[in-house]
Image: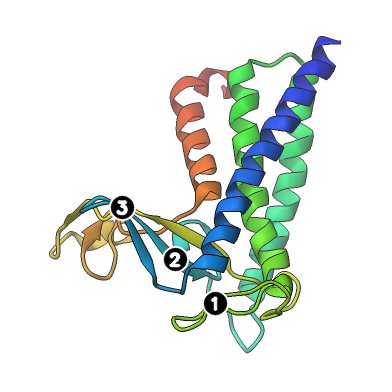
Amino acid sequence: MKQKHTSFIIAALIILLLLADQILKIWVKTNMHIGEAIVVIPDWFQLLFVENNGAAFGMQIASAGSFDWGKLALSLFRIVLVGGLCYYTFDLIRRKAPIGVIVGLALIVAGALGNILDSALYGLIFSASTPMQIAEFGGSYAPFMMGKVVDMFYFPLFQWENHPQWLSFLFDSRGYFFGPVFNLADSYISVAVVYMLIFQYKFFK
């Protein structure tokens, strides 16, 4: 009975995290233009609407030809990864693994699922977002698995124009740290990985 109870709680956690991610993304997509920013905390935190074709934090995957094979490969990889992680997570519940490990894996599953849904469905159910036009339900701007991932969290903490080249991934085009724009799904994955590396590393040894 305890095992079933834990499984239900973890499944509910994944669903709630996924809903939070999707509700925020849909609100941003249907209320903001591409490139539009809402200043939440001056000089520190903005909601900045951008979209990307690639991996977490706006990174891109190179693709040859007119069809985006890199994006398709990433989407398929995510689906396989989520399937494997779901099986592993609920297997750990059966084996009575530490709850911290299980919650960490649930965060990763929710994050991966959140970005999969963007790629799989957004191109089919929304019109395109542009600097001049807000997206609407009922349009279609891309085929299945070719939709764009919605990002919105932007933390331009300080400007360092002559930063070392090897740190460029942390800066935007204007030299602001922390430059990448990301979403809730990315946050789930990042927090879970850091948490498990610091507090749960003994389990994986």
The reply to whether the C-beta atoms of the residues labelled 2 and 3 are less than 8 Å apart is no
Q: Which circle, 1 or 3, is nearer the viewer?
A: 1
For this view, does 184 lie left or right of residue 39? right
| Lower position in the chain sequence, tag 1 or tag 3 | 1
Identify which amino acid the numbered label 1 is placed on.
Answer: Ser
Residue at the spot of label 1 = 129
For this view, does 11 lie left or right of residue 192? right
Give the secondary structure at mark 1.
loop
Residue at the spot of label 2 = 49
The reply to whether the C-beta atoms of the residues labelled 1 and 3 are less than 8 Å apart is no
Residue closest to the far front: 31
For this view, does 177 lie left or right of residue 35? left
Between the C-alphas of marks 2 and 3, the distance is 13 Å
Residue at the spot of label 3 = 155
| Residue 174 against residue 183 in the figure, above or below | below
Give the secondary structure at mark 2.
strand
Residue 175 shows which numbered tag?
none
Between the C-alphas of marks 1 and 2, the distance is 10 Å
